[in-house]
Amino acid sequence: MANQLKKLKQPSSSFLSPSCLFLSLLSLTSLFLAFSLFNTSSQSTPSKSKLLYSNSCNFTHGQWIYEPSIKSPRYDDSCKEIYKGWSCIGSKKSNALDIVKWRWKPYQCDFPQFDPLSFLHRFKNTNIGFVGDSLNRNMFVSLFCTLKRVSGEVKKWRPAGADRGFTFLKYNLTISYHRTNLLARYGRWSANANGGVLESLGYKEGYRVDVDVPEGTWAEAPSFHDILIFNTGHWWWAPSKFDPVKSPMLFFEKGNPVVPPVSPDRGLDMVLKHMISYVDKKRRPSTTLFMRTQSPRHFEGGDWDQGGSCQRSRPLSPQEVDELFSLQNNGTNVESRLVNQHLYKAFEGTRFHMLDITHMSEFRADAHPSTAGGKKHDDCMHWCLPGITDTWNDLFVAYLSNIKDRT
């Protein structure tokens, strides 16, 4: 019996006939193809979704691709929440309809527009708050108009001290905008006739900024909202508002002036530190927090009060971006990268997720209201609506979906 088993294990010394060999190969090939087709069909959709929302895909590195097939924007100037100066279609800006035909394409993955109806379904019974300056309002209005296009039953109100807000009644989803320029409370300061620490240093007037006190417009937002998107930056580099000589920013902590007085960039660091601590104490346990990076300006030929303009009709090239925003060149628009240095340093290791819209936006010198903004000067800071802030919201929803999928 042992000899028989040994004999069975020995390979045959004879070759298969040509016909048997052909049939064997054909069977193996068929099995391989069948398995491949099954494997592809069963994994194609999940893998694409996984790639779209994967941490390995850097949404911020990519290029703008022109797609003339895009016939209409996500919404139009009939959305009443659009501030008149941002309604480039309504003001007949020459390239208003072309602005939305440029699509952001990351190098590593696909990046489609978010589906507003799916968003409403997934985030029903949710409160979403935008906290920051008018650029966050730009983003808030974009999201509102996109959602209202598919769900028109809304209630207008001002939750938790918001400047404006809406609830989509069918889904009980609320979005609101809390206006704050510096995040911290601030107001005019004048020297006291009886003297004081700042008076002894020669200060006569300026703006008092309490670095550890949140502005009242958003103080209750962390305890109300399930999702918060913060921003700050533009007002910290605004010499026309906070003139370093005539009306400097004077920082206070625990009710007392910070002595020696510090520069605005150091004041920003102090505000961010206290803001992070405040939000962490006041937020709901499951609140998702975002800090949006700085929105770039595109003034060329001078700043807004020096005749600067933005007359481009198409996005900048990578070389033009480097020239306009390089820290080494220290140009008019350098503030965006300067602010981001402070933001990334402050929020490293915190519960906040960074929503980086800066680099993709640096290309879009064509997407500002410019002379169509209705001001005495070109508006090269805010964005046309519809426009690039729609893409910011695509990015926001992609990151938010990624976070929710992992929890």
Image (cartoon, helix red, strand yellow):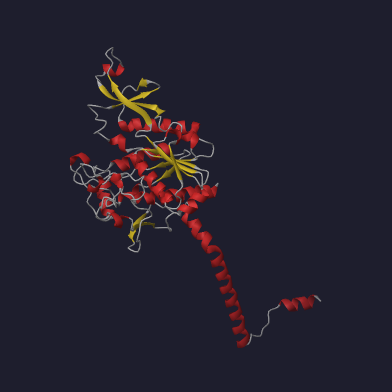
Report the residue at 28% width, 14% height from top.
195
* Residue 40: x %, y % from top left: 54, 67
Q: Quadrant of residue 103?
A: bottom left
The residue nearer to you, when weighing 25 against 65, is: 65
Left or right of residue 250: residue 214? right
* Residue 270: x %, y % from top left: 38, 30
Relative height, residue 332 to residue 89 (above, below): above
Left or right of residue 393: residue 319? left
Q: Count how many numbered circles sit on residues in the image.
A: 0
The residue nearer to you, when weighing 332 against 27, is: 332
Can residue 176 be spotted in the picture? Answer: no
* Residue 55: x %, y % from top left: 47, 51
Report the residue at 81% width, 76% height from top.
1
Report the residue at 37% width, 34% height from top.
180
* Residue 11: x %, y % from top left: 68, 79
Relative height, residue 42 to residue 227 (above, below): below
Left or right of residue 302: residue 67? right
The residue nearer to you, when weighing 292 against 10, is: 292
Left or right of residue 278: residue 386? left
Can residue 249 be spotted in the picture? Answer: yes
